[in-house]
Image: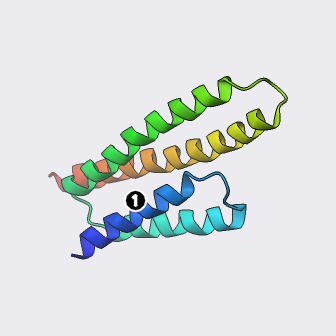
Amino acid sequence: MHRYIAQANVDHYIALLNGADLMPDRRSAITKMLISEEDGLGHDLEQLEFFEHRAAAGRKRVEHVSSLRDGFAFGTQERRQAEELLVNIENLQTLLEDSCHRLRRKIHSRGL
């Protein structure tokens, strides 16, 4: 049951971090909670698969927001907002990819 709740928390934090309207201090706090939740999960193949799915979805999000940003004219408010959102989503993506790499290393070091 704990694993299910932890995974639901991870999904909730990811959804919050994908938003455009978070203040930097709130984004930082949620990022710390996401990292803490990830650290509390097991380091097994199931968790690796869980994070790999989130990372794959994140790559699609990065592509989508990048495409949206490119649709706005340079110098417009919409373009600036899309660029800010893209930076946030790329930062989240880096975090998700790093989580996958850490889990792979831990699993590999244990010989699973």
41 and 11: which is toward the camera: 11
Q: Is residue 69 left or right of residue 6?
A: right
Q: Give the colour scheme of this rendering.
A: rainbow
Q: Is residue 2 left or right of residue 100?
A: left
| Residue farthest to the bottom, as pictured | 2
Q: Is residue 74 left or right of residue 1?
A: right
54 and 81: which is toward the camera: 81
User: Label 1, on which residue?
Assistant: 11
| Residue 97 point in image, percent of width and height | 43, 44
Identify which residue is drawn at 49% across, 38% down: 61
| Residue 16 point in image, percent of width and height | 53, 60
| Residue 35 point in image, percent of width and height | 47, 64
109 and 97: which is toward the camera: 97
User: Label 1: few (<14), some or many (≥20) within 10 Å?
Assistant: some
Identify which residue is drawn at 51% across, 30% down: 63
61 and 103: which is toward the camera: 61
For the residue marked with disc 1, what is the amino acid?
A: Asp
What secondary structure is found at the residue carrying circle 1? helix
